[in-house]
């Protein structure tokens, strides 16, 4: 049964034109329907469909949306002290008038992201004219321009009542080194030190050798910088490095819902370490996963955004900026566990065998762990 809810008779389209349909496995064009004459008790429009059928109709007009009855007579202006460039969270103060109706709230919205909008509280005082807001920039990406508006909405229905002009704030983060760890040179031979590089000469020595991991932060944004023995870019890779895949594991301080298994790499993270997010990046891929659905044989749920990658060939570093929103929910970055390992990847982690091959690692059995070098650290609590 088809039901079109909530549209009063007069607001329904005059006709619904059938454009596509199936009944069971048979194609069947649906009949045109007049929703104004169809049986419609209590403002519901009901239409019986055959079992296991799907139809598409196109309405003759767009349904009219009812406007809220009372729009407050308010003009919103953005605060005069709104900065044009920021490096982190900042304070703004505004001069009202703030809505006096308890059912109306004033909110600060960035880039249309209503889900993370901040509700503005008027400071107590006569006429509720003054307000102050500490703007949360934890979801703002480095080197981007944010579009900021104030809006009034109904506190319960969230119906939009008024919107201010938009203004722009540029975010340029200031990064601080949180921790660094040096890793031995030449330990790029697997967990037991017996693996050998693939035989193709483009796998230059040092390609898998991590020499240093640095963790930088700006607020709760995270930058992971890896110094390598060599940066290989023989095939002009999209991400600026080649013949190596980096797999990062990021564990939040609270270990609930975390895992130790390293998907597709035939190993686990060391004892007392865990991960919530996993980034796998090689020359042509850059994918960030959560633990949901992850196992030894499955990578889990991919997030829409990977890392922002920058390569410095002269310094032999590859830098990964994680999406700013990734850790916005943790109270602080203290206690965060980070590790990275190297292997190679081509539509799957490369194979391992005793004899090795052109692009296959050698010196190990096929079922042994698939990583050449590894380093990790924990941000000091
Ligand atoms: Ca190393
Ligand atoms: Ca190592």
Image (tube, helix red, strand yellow):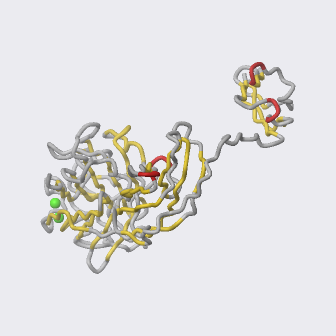
Q: Where is residue 366 in the image (x, y as percent from the top left)?
A: 27, 47
Number of marks in picture:
0
Near-viewer residue (204 or 55)? 55
Q: Is residue 7 above or below residue 120?
A: above
Q: Residue 166: x and y, percent?
A: 55, 63
Taking the image as shown, residue 245 lies to the left or right of residue 49, namely left
Q: Quadrant of ligand 1?
A: bottom left
Q: Of 346 and 111, which appears nearest the observer?
A: 111
From the viewer's perspective, is residue 293 above or below residue 200?
Answer: above
Looking at the image, can residue 324 be seen? Answer: no
Q: Which residue is drawn at 84% across and 41% down?
A: 60
Which residue is rendered at x = 76% and y = 40% of the image?
A: 63
Q: In this view, does 154 lie to the left or right of 210?
A: right
Nearer-the-camera pick, 13 or 369: 13
- Dividing the image into 4 quarters, which one contains the N terminus? top right
The residue lying furthest to the front in this view is 126
The residue at 17%/63% (across/down) is: 179
Judge from the rendering whether residue 75 lies leftward or rightward of residue 297; answer left or right.
right
Up-down relation of residue 89 to residue 158 (above or below)? below
The x and y percentages for residue 4 are 72, 29
**Residue most toward the bottom?**
314
In the picture, measured across the screen, residue 89 lies left or right of residue 206, that is right
Q: Is residue 103 visible?
A: yes
Residue at (37% x, 39% y) in the render: 292
Q: Residue 254: image x %, image y %?
A: 23, 42
């Amino acid at each position: 049964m088809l039901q079109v809810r909530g549209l009063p008779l007069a607001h329904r389209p005059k006709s619904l034109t059938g454009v596509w349909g199936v009944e069971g496995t048979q194609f069947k064009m649906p009949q045109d329907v007049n929703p104004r004459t169809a049986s419609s008790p209590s403002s519901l429009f009901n239409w019986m469909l055959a079992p296991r059928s799907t139809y598409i109709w196109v309405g003759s007009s767009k349904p009219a949306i009812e406007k809220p009855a009372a729009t407050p007579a308010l003009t919103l202006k953005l605060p005069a002290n709104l900065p044009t460039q920021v490096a982190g969270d900042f304070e703004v103060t505004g001069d009202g008038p703030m809505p006096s109706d308890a059912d109306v709230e004033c909110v600060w919205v960035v880039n249309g992201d209503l889900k993370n909008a901040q509700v503005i509280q008027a400071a107590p005082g006569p006429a509720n004219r003054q307000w102050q807001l500490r703007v949360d920039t934890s979801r703002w990406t480095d080197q981007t321009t944010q579009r900021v508006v104030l809006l009034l909405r109904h506190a319960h229905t969230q119906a939009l009542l008024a919107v201010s002009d938009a203004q722009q704030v540029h975010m340029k983060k200031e990064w601080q080194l949180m921790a660094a760890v040096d890793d031995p040179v030449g330990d790029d031979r697997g967990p037991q030190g017996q693996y050998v590089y693939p035989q193709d000469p483009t796998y230059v020595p040092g390609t898998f050798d991590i020499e240093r991991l640095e963790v930088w932060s700006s607020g709760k944004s995270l930058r992971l910088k890896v110094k390598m023995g060599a940066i290989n870019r023989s095939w002009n890779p999209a991400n600026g490095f080649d013949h190596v895949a980096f797999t990062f594991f990021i564990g939040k301080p609270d270990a609930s819902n975390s895992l130790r298994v390293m998907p597709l790499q035939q190993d686990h993270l060391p004892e007392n370490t865990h991960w919530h997010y996993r980034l796998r990046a090689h020359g042509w891929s850059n994918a960030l996963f959560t633990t949901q659905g992850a196992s030894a044989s499955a990578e889990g749920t991919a997030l829409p955004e990977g890392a922002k990658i920058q390569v410095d060939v002269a310094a032999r570093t590859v830098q990964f900026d994680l999406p700013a929103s990734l850790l916005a929910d943790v109270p602080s970055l203290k206690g965060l566990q980070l590790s990275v390992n190297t292997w190679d990847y081509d539509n799957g982690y490369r194979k391992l065998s005793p004899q090795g091959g052109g692009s296959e690692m050698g010196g190990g059995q096929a079922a042994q762990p698939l990583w050449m070098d590894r380093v990790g650290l924990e941000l000091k609590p």
